[in-house]
Image (cartoon, coloured by chain):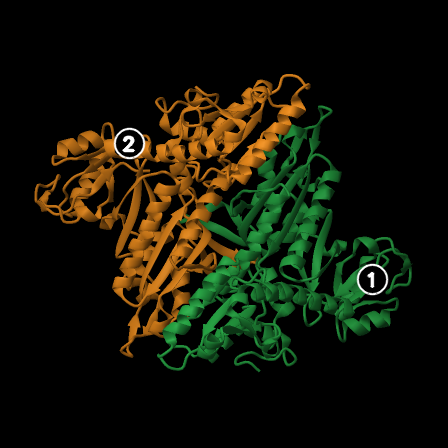
Chain colours: A orange, B green
Amino acid sequence: MAKGITRRSEDYSRWYTDVIRVAELAEHSVVKGCMVIRPWGYAIWERIRDALDAMIKETGHVNAYFPLLIPESLLAREAEHVEGFSPECAVVTHGGGKKLAEPLYVRPTSEAVICSTYARWMESWRDLPILVNQWANVVRWEMRTRLFLRTTEFLWQEGHTAHETAGEAREEVARMLDVYRRLAEEWLAMPVRAGVKSASERFAGAEETWAIEAMMQDRRALQAGTSHFLGQNFAKAYDMKFQGRSGDLEYAWSTSWGVSTRLVGGLVMSHSDDRGLVLPPRLAPLQAVIVPIYRSDERRSEVMGKAAEIGRALEDAGIRSRVDDRDHVKPGAKFFEWEKKGVPVRLEIGPRDLDAGQAVVVRRDLGKESKETASLEAVPGRIGELLDRMQDDLFRRARERLETHTHEVEEYADLAGILNGELGFVKAPWCGNPACEEKVKEETTATIRVIEEAERDHPGRCVVCGRDSRLRPIFARAY
Amino acid sequence: MAKGITRRSEDYSRWYTDVIRVAELAEHSVVKGCMVIRPWGYAIWERIRDALDAMIKETGHVNAYFPLLIPESLLAREAEHVEGFSPECAVVTHGGGKKLAEPLYVRPTSEAVICSTYARWMESWRDLPILVNQWANVVRWEMRTRLFLRTTEFLWQEGHTAHETAGEAREEVARMLDVYRRLAEEWLAMPVRAGVKSASERFAGAEETWAIEAMMQDRRALQAGTSHFLGQNFAKAYDMKFQGRSGDLEYAWSTSWGVSTRLVGGLVMSHSDDRGLVLPPRLAPLQAVIVPIYRSDERRSEVMGKAAEIGRALEDAGIRSRVDDRDHVKPGAKFFEWEKKGVPVRLEIGPRDLDAGQAVVVRRDLGKESKETASLEAVPGRIGELLDRMQDDLFRRARERLETHTHEVEEYADLAGILNGELGFVKAPWCGNPACEEKVKEETTATIRVIEEAERDHPGRCVVCGRDSRLRPIFARAY
């Protein structure tokens, strides 16, 4: 066992917090339920953010910024929305040394303030669609928190769009769900199942909530992103009206969609091992670390010089790298440190390597067994190959896990057996009755994660009540 | 006068809000004192942020994120700090439907929460320096707000560093002040005067506050960035101790520094004119807009095709551009719209230009008089030149204004005459007595903006009391 890390097989939950601690990703703060995102954790979030921001812009959206504080009366205009969110809000009652005439909620999400602003921006159908995204912090009062996965304050992006027709809004919901799927799969190497939520798991105020769900190494589900079709609910509550093509005033159709720093938690639980964090190369803030090895001062400057030269060659090849040139830390300690932090490739170079014109290269995910030597000229090319392969391998392994642990059952006993046993995703027929869904939850703590598009008209008999069913949701225990 | 814009000569303050409105940079929200930063305004902020973020990283800093909410008792540990900030805080008293045991302040700045975290991160001198920056929103209750310049919530970055020695901390303060100067001058084309603040204008809890001050077109000062030497004040309050080289426990020396969305306001007031916003090309989200001109449908597709081709050529040349291909808006209306939004270069192309193999190019700051034709092959190169020149010209004009309206005086009557008259920066001898500073403020509403490095030992007689003085601060009325 690596120092300070509980084995996964022993206690998965402690392993998770240990990895976050030793990799210096985040820590609890003095403020209950709020975390400090440490530089290494924040650098990963920055890379996720930049990748997603580019995709959001490529699909025609622009960024903007809306106020943090929302008057109680404004939030209250959409009945289901306020009912869902107000119990988990932080409330500002005093400002500038005085009691406020009206309490202000710290935003738990921004539909209220954004929709009421859009109402001012739209006059005619020519002003639509409005396609805006915001990167922001939000606060939701949480009783039981867990670093990254569930914290009182978290960072996220929230897209909010308004459209002329229901069809366009639905297309937007699907488009952004697919952007999230690509972000998860292509960047985080985290395969997901996409689909629609059941009514009980819907966003407060939405007509439909779509989501992507990933499977962690302990075979629990993690909701990794949501995309909501809001119908005309918020348009009616916040007066989003425009003059339509016919000349009549019409209500807009709106959507919202978001992912958060929770993704960093998903990343940790998808790929890391008992030695610490494992980072997908595309997201790693550092892709390769170069550790110079020398015993005496004699050949130090020679080794350091070559290490720096390799570092420059890697940068030229577009590989994010660093030479760990700290004199007071021994090479072995450096190996462990970067291993814990998940840097995809380690390169070692000492006097003997120098003489042989080569360097030693090790992949983080495969460890010692992947150790190989590469001639110095070939190093940048070889590391580039290893990074690509590692990205693919992480995704492939995670997908194998997802596939192996996705079961299709017809009988309740099988469903309950898996959900109370080895866990995983269980697809089973469901009649659509919330009572049947609730029974599964009571007896297994599992919930319906999503109903995939292809499983929305798949005839069968409800696994709970035996009545005719057309839906086959994925049931799982979730974070 | 452009439609909807008050002339500067008529009412400078209304002109400012008009430009922000017609350029669609920001607007007041339903939340008192808080603004909505609209997409065009936010795109400018994104470019400022990206430029500064790169400079912050180049100087060895990393980003992280700390909690929004700060317990009252934590803020209270540094006496001057809490005294300065608590009267302007928004206070959360309820969370999750219950009254909190202890009120939480929405951060007005993050020294308290960051320093108490650093205390856990430092054990020995080897853990120093800690060089961390945060991009975040902060809230300070403001009675009189003005878009971008003074809002209850604003976006900013706040750097917080901890060092082994006072000397290193002072170097850091100077380094970051210079980064801010470069950001202002090289990106915003906004020349500044840098120096130290007088005690009355110091950050609450700091030993020294350094700042850069720009001069707006109405000759008022705008504080554009601050860098604080905090001495060991916060280290003592938040227990930032480490084992020094001698083996003894020592208190760290700390700094903090920040710039905010206020810079966007400074940008507007530095360069814009009676026709709307003028953007420095390096910061403009769009550097060139291409307006296709056609009367009949006959040659529409031909003109559009060529416009698109030019657009691609500009993108290839690294110029941020867009073809305005809206059919329902007339070319003249497009001209006005992009002029109001400050896009540096407009390119017009119609059937006759097409036949002649050329396009018409106009610079935003110079208007009609700069109209010229360029052959189509030469367009990308020519626009590149115009953008460079415009960046230089905006800076040069702003610097001329700053120099022309900086006066050196020895007599009080001259000081008061300028500060109650034409305005500007007035350098005058000051004995260092706060009573003399206060008298100037009472009689002119002007304050000491900064004392430049070279004016900290410049003998004279205090302009107020006539006693010997060594300081020559810059006095000005400020935003």
**Residue hosting label 2:** A401
Q: Find residue A80 and name its label.
A: none
* Tag 1 secondary structure: helix
Q: Quadrant of residue A163?
A: bottom left
Task: Please provide percent x and percent y for residue A245.
Answer: 29, 76
Callout 1 amino acid: Cys
User: In the rendered structure, the residue with mark 1 lies on which chain?
Assistant: B
Task: Please provide percent x and percent y for residue A388.
Answer: 41, 36
| Image side of residue B464 versus residue B114, left or right | right
Callout 2 amino acid: Arg
Compared to residue A37, the image places residue B290 above or below, namely: below
- Residue at 41 percent of width and 79 percent of height: B294
Does residue A109 appear in this view?
Answer: no
Foreground of the two, A28 or B96: A28
| Image side of residue A289 versus residue B239, left or right | left
User: In the rendered structure, the residue with mark 2 lies on which chain?
Assistant: A
Task: Please provide percent x and percent y for residue A225.
Answer: 34, 47
Crowd rating for badge 2 (residues with CA inside 10 Å; few <14, some 14–19, many 20+): some
Compared to residue A310, the image places residue B209 above or below, namely: below
Foreground of the two, B190 or B128: B190
- Residue at 46 percent of width and 52 percent of height: A136
Image quadrant holding the N terminus of chain A, namely top left
Foreground of the two, B353 or A305: B353
Task: Please provide percent x and percent y for residue B115.
Answer: 61, 40
Q: Find residue B436 and name its label.
A: 1
Compared to residue B195, the image places residue A331 above or below, namely: above
| Image side of residue A448 versus residue B319, left or right | left
Compared to residue B26, the image places residue B96 above or below, namely: above
